Image (tube, grey):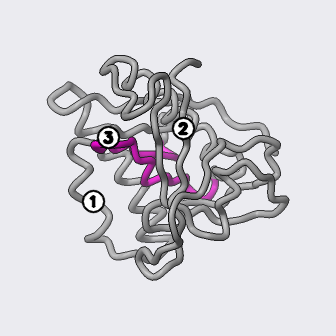
């Protein structure tokens, strides 16, 4: 793996807080570049009903503050949903996808502890993602030694080198399903609230 450039992770401020719109727009810009321009998905489907209330996390390289990656967390009634993971093509070699998922997990832990939301089981919170079938290994417990494309929610987000030695521990739940013309699997993590 190439040495990554210096970077910062920013959790976009909540609704009504200063800086939210500008930082959220930077997240949108990354998503539109990856999902619309690169992957060819319709522009009008990129921003959806979850974007207004969701927590957006932005990765920017330093010192330029160029936005190069983003991930979105949607808090639903029974679980948190990891969605809209995107990393610009030129920056995928640095495994920023992993960094963003780890940042989302840290946010979920803090949010669940603050709201006393275990969503069913004390000390544990459920996080789900919709993964394209060929790349379940990025989230799961098994290592696959190949380059793959990660698909979260509805789009191929970015290439990931699955030679990383550890996965996140997500496990498949339910049957495979079609999402936007591609087969997917719901992947679920029982995330411990302790660090």
Image coordinates of residue 10 in percent, x first then y, are 43, 29
Left or right, 146 with reference to 46:
right
Marks 1 and 2, Cα distance to the nearest angstrom? 28 Å
Return the residue at label 2: 190
**Local crowd size for mark 1, using a 10 Å CA cut-off: few (<14), some (14–19), many (≥20):** few
Return the residue at label 1: 47
3 vs 1, front mark: 3
1 vs 2, front mark: 2
Look at the image and give the residue range highlighted in magenta: 67-90
3 vs 2, front mark: 2
Q: Earlier in the sequence, mark 3 or mark 2?
A: 3
Quarter of the image holding residue 162?
bottom right
**Local crowd size for mark 3, using a 10 Å CA cut-off: few (<14), some (14–19), many (≥20):** some
Residue at image coords 63%, 55%: 90
Quarter of the image holding residue 179?
bottom left
Label 2 sits on a secondary structure element that is strand
Image coordinates of residue 159 in percent, x first then y, are 66, 60
Left or right, 167 with reference to 59:
right
Closest to the observer, 35 or 82: 82
Residue at image coords 38%, 25%: 112
Closest to the observer, 28 or 176: 176
Residue at image coords 59%, 19%: 195
Return the residue at label 3: 75
Among all residues in the image, which is located at the extreme left? 16
Marks 3 and 2, Cα distance to the nearest angstrom? 15 Å
């Amino acid at each position: 793996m190439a040495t990554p450039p210096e970077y910062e992770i920013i959790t976009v401020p909540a609704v009504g807080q200063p800086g939210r719109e500008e930082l959220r727009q930077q997240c949108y810009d990354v998503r539109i570049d990856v999902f619309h321009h690169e992957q060819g998905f319709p522009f009008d489907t990129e921003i959806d009903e979850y974007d207004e209330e969701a927590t957006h996390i932005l990765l920017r390289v330093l010192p330029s503050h160029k936005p190069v990656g983003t991930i979105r967390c949607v808090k639903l009634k029974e679980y948190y949903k990891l969605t809209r993971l995107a990393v610009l093509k030129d920056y995928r070699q640095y495994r920023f996808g992993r960094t963003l998922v780890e940042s989302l997990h840290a946010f979920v832990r803090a949010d669940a502890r603050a709201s006393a939301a275990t969503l069913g089981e004390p000390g544990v919170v459920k996080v789900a993602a919709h993964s394209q079938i060929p790349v379940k290994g990025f989230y799961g417990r098994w290592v696959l030694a190949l380059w793959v494309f990660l698909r979260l929610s509805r789009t191929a987000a970015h290439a990931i080198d699955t030679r990383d030695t550890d996965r996140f521990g997500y496990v498949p739940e339910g049957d495979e399903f079609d999402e936007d013309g591609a087969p997917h699997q719901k992947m679920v993590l029982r995330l411990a609230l302790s660090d």
